[in-house]
Image (cartoon, rainbow, N blue to C red):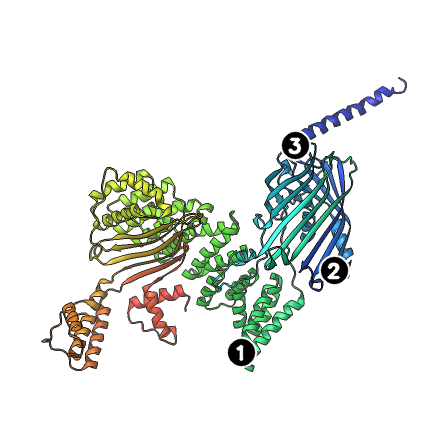
Amino acid sequence: MGPPRPALLALPALLLLLAGARAEKEMLENVSRICPRDTTRFKHLRKYTYNYEAESSSGVPGTADSRSATRINCKVELEVPQLCSFILKTSQCTLKEVYGFNPEGRALLKKTKNSEEFAAAMSRYELKLVIPEGKQVFLYPEKDEPTHILNIKRGIISALLVPPETEETKQVLFLDTVYGNCSTHFTVKTRKGNVATEISTERDLGQCDRFKPIRTGVSPLALIKGMTHPLSTLISSSQSCQYTLDTKRKHVAEAICKEQHLFLPFSYKNMYGMGVQVTQTLKLEDTPKINSRFFGEGTKKVGLAFESTKSTSPPKQAEAVLKTLQELKKLTISEQNIQRANLFHKLVTELRGLSDEAVTSLLPQLIEVSSPITLQALVQCGQPQCSTHILQWLKRVHANPLLIDVVTYLVALIPEPSAQQLREIFNMAREQRSRATLYALSHAVNNYHKTNPTGTQELLDIANYLMEQIQDDCTGDEDYTYLILRVIGNMGQTMEQLTPELKSSILKCVQSTKPSLMIQKAAIQALRKMEPKDEDQEVLLQTFLDDASPGDKRLAAYLMLMRSPSQADINKIVQLLPREQNEQVKNFVASHIANILNSEELDIQDLKKLAKEALKESQLPTVMDFRKFSRNYRFSKSVSLPSLDPASAKIEGNLIFDPNNYLPKETMLKMTLTAFGFASADLFEIGLEGKGFEPTLEALFGKQGFFPDSVNKALYWVNGQVPDGVSKVLVDHFGYTKEDKREQDMVNGMMFTVQKLIEDLKSKEVPEAKAYLRILGEELGFARLHDLQLLGKLLLTDRPDALMITTAQDRKDACTFFKDAGLP
């Protein structure tokens, strides 16, 4: 056969080459669809080498002795194996710090002790990143990359990101930065032909969506919480960058970015004064070609925005906390209480600086020194590592349930709770089943959801637990079901987003006649923060139209329906009024619609139009005597201010009477404010509901009641010693005549009257009442009349078991109160 020919040997290699070229072409076409060439300034198969320098200085310019500075120098290489895909490598890094200043005021720098360690950390791992479509930046760091090193590399990347210019000289763009997505003023300063050669960008960092000032601890007992954000406005944070671009290839030849964080109260003209300056400089050194097209995305994917770093607490810091607590305990013995406030503040501040692990290991020693002071300090700390451990500790030592309730409620008031805090509060509420812990859970859920809008496992577990408690049409334990429904109403918006099935369960409770009237009305109120949908509105409308339902349930459904009614809903309500048999319902609805028509409130103008349309062919019934019939009261006023959005305020009240005896059974007072273009906000709302007060009122104010009899006796004893006009009014009101024979002994007479009142009240039905308070839409809790009565007895005795409980009903009420309050 002979030796093989060269042409035959070259054929397989040629085929492989053609196949590789075709695969490369297809890959580049796919990449081009994701990343068009004009969206990036860095060409693929190139390596861009920069000299990087970053300097951070703080203090007041012109006062050399009070300034500090740190400088970083590195060699930065940006490889581009594919369009919009990059590999960042840093090497030859040095870390320097200031040790003095020359006569001209310039900082003198020297290498820090850990400079070599820093250089090794910076060069240990490369950082891969992609910018699909040239917009959002995604990083793929190695799993062992320290967060503080990754943040430095984030700063380098952010300084190199320059969007492609357009024909417009000035634009406002939204760009990814280390502070999140920022509104950026983009300006082309010079051009060479159609190519920009100098570009500048400016941004107010306070407007970036991930710009968050460092939050300090806040006590849950503080009247004003969450002041970090308002106080952060006292610091002006801005960034400006100047870019010089290559005229041929359009890549970044030089970048200079300056950040300034200025403390405004100590500044001059908001420009000069105490602050921090950060300057980054990148200068291009070389752009060699590369052959590697390989780019493998890592398993860990993060954004460009800075991540917070957790500092570990040194052992000496934990020792300082223990020493402060010991000094604080000694003050009681030495009677130097004047130092107590300062030492306690120092103790709380030191606790806030500890890590979670440090608090865990230190807590047993603190408790051994003084458990009461440790408890107070942990409550005031307000940090996750404090509140989590305090709840665990209280459970572990089997603390008094009343103490657990109080502490849990206080911990729940801390803004921006962590997932671990929320889990601990949920566990406590599930175990205690008391009003304090369940309302605490609702506050914690609302605060947590503000910073974690997506459903986490903690939120889903809470939603599932609440839904379990109202199964079977809310026919479980009446008191606990009522409490669960009140709590759901407090966090309805969050719960609806997590589990829409929860609303369906609530609507079943509204429609069912199995639970008590109290439960049915609580189910209607549980919808107050949920988004009204057509099917929800239909259920509420049918509940109102059902004349077999109690009047107060129908009115509760009506008020919930009128949050967002349709034209058809209002038409049906107006058409029903002339033939409505329940005078209390008719009078209340008529007064409510009449007040809507006369209201100046800004956010009900659309509702007013719907009411006017419904009344074109009909007329509202005449509103009857306010002393006997239910009605709605409303006073509103709107004000137009120059160059500002109009503002309005409203005070609204509901008074619902019992149809059998013309005594009020429900009342509500609410104040609402609409201003500065924001949605209306309920500043406060107070509600009271009661029944069974008729016998008590009769015993107090009836013809033979306590007050008329006492007044008659008083008139007899002071006869001739009070003005005739006063005597005449009292005689006319209580029906006293001077001819009536009265007890001559004042003391014995009054004692007989008081004893008669006590006997009358004992023989009468015990009244029931509930009151609630809401501030800015958040219900803080509710109280019952029995709570106040039993609490009064508790305060008048030394021990809870010494209460004067004489009847079976008293014993039952006491057990319920102690169970809710957590007392043994």
Please state if 385 lies on the left or on the right of 39 as rendered.
Answer: left
Q: Does the residue at mark 2 contact the one at mark 3 (Cβ under 8 Å)?
A: no
Which of labels 1 and 2 is toward the front?
A: 2
User: Of helix, strand and loop, which one carries label 1?
Assistant: helix
Where does the image place residue 149, in percent across and percent down from the top left? Answer: 70, 52
User: Of helix, strand and loop, which one carries label 3?
Assistant: loop
In the depicted view, which residue is nearer to us: 368 or 263? 263
Which of labels 2 and 3 is toward the front?
A: 2
Circle 3 is placed at which residue position?
A: 36
Of mark 2 and mark 3, the one earlier in the sequence is 3
Residue 441 visible within the image: yes
Of mark 1 and mark 3, the one earlier in the sequence is 3
Q: Is residue 746 above or below residue 376?
A: below
User: Of helix, strand and loop, which one carries label 2?
Assistant: loop
- Estimate the spatial distance between the alpha carbons at disc 2 and disc 3, rounded to whole Å: 49 Å
- Identify residue type, mark 3: Pro
- Identify residue type, mark 2: Gly
Circle 2 is placed at which residue position?
A: 105
In the depicted view, which residue is nearer to us: 679 or 642? 642
Residue, far left: 739
Residue, far right: 2
Of mark 1 and mark 2, the one earlier in the sequence is 2
Q: Crowding near pointer 3: few (<14 within 10 Å), some, many (20+)?
A: some
Say which mark, if any, is on residue 337. 1
Residue at 52% x, 72% y is 372
Q: In this view, does 139 lie above or below 325?
A: above
In the depicted view, which residue is nearer to us: 242 or 798? 242
Where does the image place residue 106, in percent across and percent down from the top left? Answer: 75, 58
In the depicted view, which residue is nearer to us: 547 or 335? 335
